[in-house]
């Protein structure tokens, strides 16, 4: 009757599928698909993660699901992956690119990466001292530039290992 | 950072290889030995002219003395 008609029209007006496009702050219903690949090994292949922190050349960034598409060059630094159980894993990458695709996928390509436990602080310290000596010496411009690049990697490594 | 000036001297590929090499040299002993093998590249090239192959030349001459198989 009229009561029934009132009910059905009210039901039609109420948002049936509540907020399909909106996402609550507390839960991330969408997961980011991460592929972290090296030439010799694929650390992640389309794995569902919640957040990835990358050391972009323009500054550190945190990538969540549904990020705007972008391409970022990476500097030597730590990539941190947070999965749904809130555990974080860190890898130090030498350099590379992070590409956020429009369909909620993140691809990180690097030549070399290793977990922080695999590094030896002694070796880093010795290498850094040597690289700084070459960079400040009187070799060719190329040699000095090479040493400066290496020194940057070692300094970033020291920073990552120190604040582990 | 001073590291931005390498672009005048190197290509990005060279920069990436240098950074990767620096990372490999900072690993602990066991991983470092495995990783160093990844850094080795061997290239041999040969100039062809009029259907005749020229001398095969190593880009980085290997240090092994002893028998080396002839190219052709």
Image (cartoon, rainbow, N blue to C red):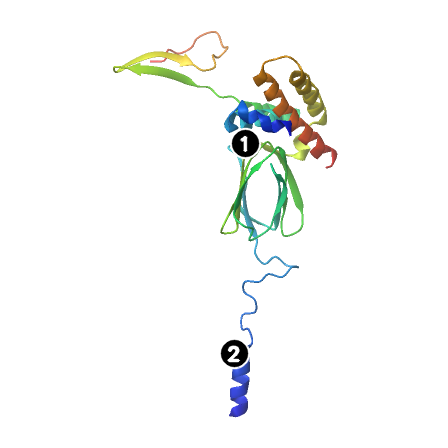
Give the quadrant of residue B21: top right
Q: Which residue is mark 1?
A: A111
Which quadrant is the C terminus of chain B positioned in? Answer: top left
What is the CA distance from the residue labelled 1 to the residue labelled 2?
55 Å
Name the chain letter of the residue that bears numbered label 1. A
Q: Residues within 10 Å of mark 1 (few under 14, many from 20)?
A: many
Q: Is residue A164 left or right of residue A66?
A: right
Of the numbered discs 1 and 2, the one sitting upstream in the chain is 2
For residue A154, say whether it is visible: yes
SS of the residue at dot 1? loop
Which quadrant is the N terminus of chain B positioned in? Answer: top right
SS of the residue at dot 2? helix
Of A75 and B43, nearer the camera is: A75
- Find residue A8 and report its horizontal and vertical position in percent: 52, 83
> What residue appears at the point 60 percent right and 21 percent down from the top-left corner?
A145
> What residue appears at the point 60 percent right and 23 percent down from the top-left corner?
B33
Q: Which residue is mark 2?
A: A12
Of B33 and A121, nearer the camera is: A121
> What residue appears at the point 42 percent right and 10 percent down from the top-left corner?
B68
């Amino acid at each position: 009757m009229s009561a029934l008609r009132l009910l059905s029209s009210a039901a039609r007006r109420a948002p049936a599928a509540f907020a399909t496009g909106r996402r609550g702050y507390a839960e991330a219903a969408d997961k980011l698909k991460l592929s972290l690949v090296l030439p010799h090994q694929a650390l992640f292949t389309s794995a569902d993660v919640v957040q990835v922190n990358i050391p972009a050349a323009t500054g550190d960034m945190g990538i969540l699901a549904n990020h705007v598409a972008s391409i970022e060059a990476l500097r030597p630094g730590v990539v941190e992956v947070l999965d749904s159980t809130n555990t974080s894993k860190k890898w130090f990458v030498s350099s590379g690119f992070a590409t956020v695709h429009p369909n909620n996928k993140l691809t990180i390509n690097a030549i070399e990466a290793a977990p922080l436990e695999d590094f030896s602080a002694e070796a880093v310290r010795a290498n850094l001292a040597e690289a700084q000596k070459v960079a400040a010496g009187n070799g060719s411009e190329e040699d000095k530039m090479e040493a400066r690049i290496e020194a940057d990697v070692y300094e970033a490594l020291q920073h990552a290992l120190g604040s582990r | 950072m001073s590291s931005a000036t390498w672009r005048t001297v190197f290509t990005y590929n060279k920069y990436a290889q240098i950074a990767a090499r620096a990372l490999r040299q900072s690993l602990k002993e066991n991983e470092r030995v495995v990783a160093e093998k990844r850094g080795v590249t061997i290239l041999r090239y040969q100039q062809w002219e009029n259907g005749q192959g020229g001398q095969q030349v190593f880009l980085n001459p290997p240090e092994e003395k002893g028998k080396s198989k002839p190219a052709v």
